[in-house]
Image (spheres, helix red, strand yellow):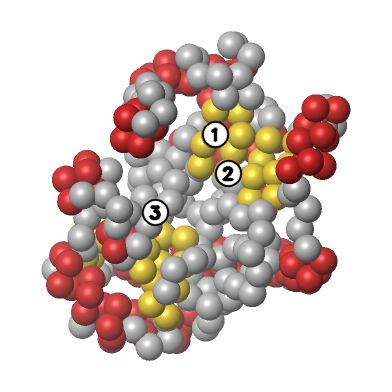
């Protein structure tokens, strides 16, 4: 944000996307809207349909990053989005062995858009394209297990005294349950949780996990755990991280396809 405002002289306004009134007011002034729902790592939800209505009233397109939700759990085009983008490296590929992304338009590309695509690139190489197609063949089956394991672990973590809070969109008790029921089918397998022991407890947890790997990324067959304060948000100062809700004791967990009994055993021994 500071780079944008100081170097490029771009006006930046930071708003809470979960405050619907403030969010939609900001959207109505935008030239284009790019949103991620659920957000990573705090799993906050944004009402896609209302965002589209506010943006389209000023002829602004809406692009939804649907990587975390996946096409199985959320379909942004059903709520009026103009574009959907995915990191194909994650759930669509599902095996953590390629790098790629895709942008999907609801309408046919305009000649100008086709020229941009042709002249600037954007065509995946043959091997990575094959790896994504291979992964898509098992996508539905993998997502069934991802969704089952994700919910089971979120519920289990909520019962643990070592855990202060679990961030998982599929809980009916969460304040944004109405948005979840409207636009998502399942809660997915990415979640975060805050440990009561703070930074010390988080480091200890990551040192003790065995089956779960301490590593970045998400959406693969293996379960991965990481501290956002020392990975995705490490460039922010402590005060900024706290304002963003990224505590030192926050763990992000990408739940894989392993046996749920094995995962719970590993989590239990790492927490105690």
Q: Residues within 10 Å of mark 1 (few under 14, many from 20)?
A: some
Asked if 145 appears above or below 67 in the picture, the reply is: below
Q: Secondary structure at mark 2?
A: strand
Q: Is residue 140 visible?
A: yes
Position of 107 compared to 218: left or right? right
Q: Are marks 3 and 1 in contact (CB under 8 Å)?
A: no
Position of 202 compared to 146: left or right? left
Residue in the image at 32% along x and 30% along y? 6
Q: Position of residue 231 (x, y in %)?
A: 35, 62
Q: Position of residue 232 (x, y in %)?
A: 37, 57
Q: Is residue 16 visible?
A: no
Residue in the image at 76% along x and 58% along y? 124
Asked if 187 appears above or below 2 in the picture, the reply is: below
Return the residue nearer the eye: 75 or 251.
Answer: 251
Q: Secondary structure at mark 3?
A: loop
Return the residue nearer the eye: 7 or 177.
Answer: 7
Quadrant the N terminus occupies: top left
Q: CA distance from mark 2 to mark 1?
A: 7 Å
Quadrant the C terminus occupies: bottom left
Of labels 3 and 1, earlier in sequence is 1
Q: Position of residue 51 (x, y in %)?
A: 53, 25
Q: Which residue is mark 2?
A: 65
Q: Are marks 2 and 1 in contact (CB under 8 Å)?
A: yes
Q: Position of residue 255 (x, y in %)?
A: 48, 70
Of labels 2 and 3, earlier in sequence is 3
Residue in the image at 34% along x and 79% along y? 267
Q: Secondary structure at mark 1?
A: strand
Asked if 79 appears above or below 127 in the picture, the reply is: above
């Amino acid at each position: 944000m500071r780079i944008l405002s100081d170097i490029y002289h771009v006006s930046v306004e930071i708003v809470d996307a979960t405050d619907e009134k403030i969010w939609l007011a900001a959207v109505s002034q935008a030239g284009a809207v790019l949103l991620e729902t659920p957000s990573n790592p705090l799993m906050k939800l944004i009402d896609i349909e209302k965002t589209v209505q506010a943006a389209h009233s000023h002829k602004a397109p809406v692009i939804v990053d649907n990587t975390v939700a996946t096409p199985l759990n959320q379909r942004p085009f059903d709520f009026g989005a103009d574009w959907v983008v995915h990191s194909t490296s994650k759930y669509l590929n599902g095996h953590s062995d390629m790098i790629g992304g895709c942008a999907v338009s609801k309408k046919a590309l305009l000649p100008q858009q086709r020229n941009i695509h042709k002249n600037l690139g954007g065509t995946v190489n043959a091997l990575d394209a094959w790896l994504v197609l291979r992964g898509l063949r098992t996508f539905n089956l993998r997502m069934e297990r991802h969704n089952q394991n994700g919910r089971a672990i979120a519920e289990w973590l909520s019962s643990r005294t070592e855990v202060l809070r679990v961030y998982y969109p599929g809980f009916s008790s969460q304040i944004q349950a109405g948005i979840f029921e409207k636009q998502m089918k399942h809660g997915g397998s990415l979640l975060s949780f805050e440990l009561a022991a703070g930074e010390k407890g988080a480091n200890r947890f990551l040192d003790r996990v065995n089956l779960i790997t301490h590593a970045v990324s998400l959406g693969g067959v293996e379960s991965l755990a990481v501290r956002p304060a020392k990975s995705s948000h490490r460039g922010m100062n402590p005060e900024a991280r706290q304002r963003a809700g990224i505590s030192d004791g926050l763990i992000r967990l990408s739940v894989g396809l392993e046996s749920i009994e094995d995962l719970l055993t590993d989590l239990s021994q790492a927490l105690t």
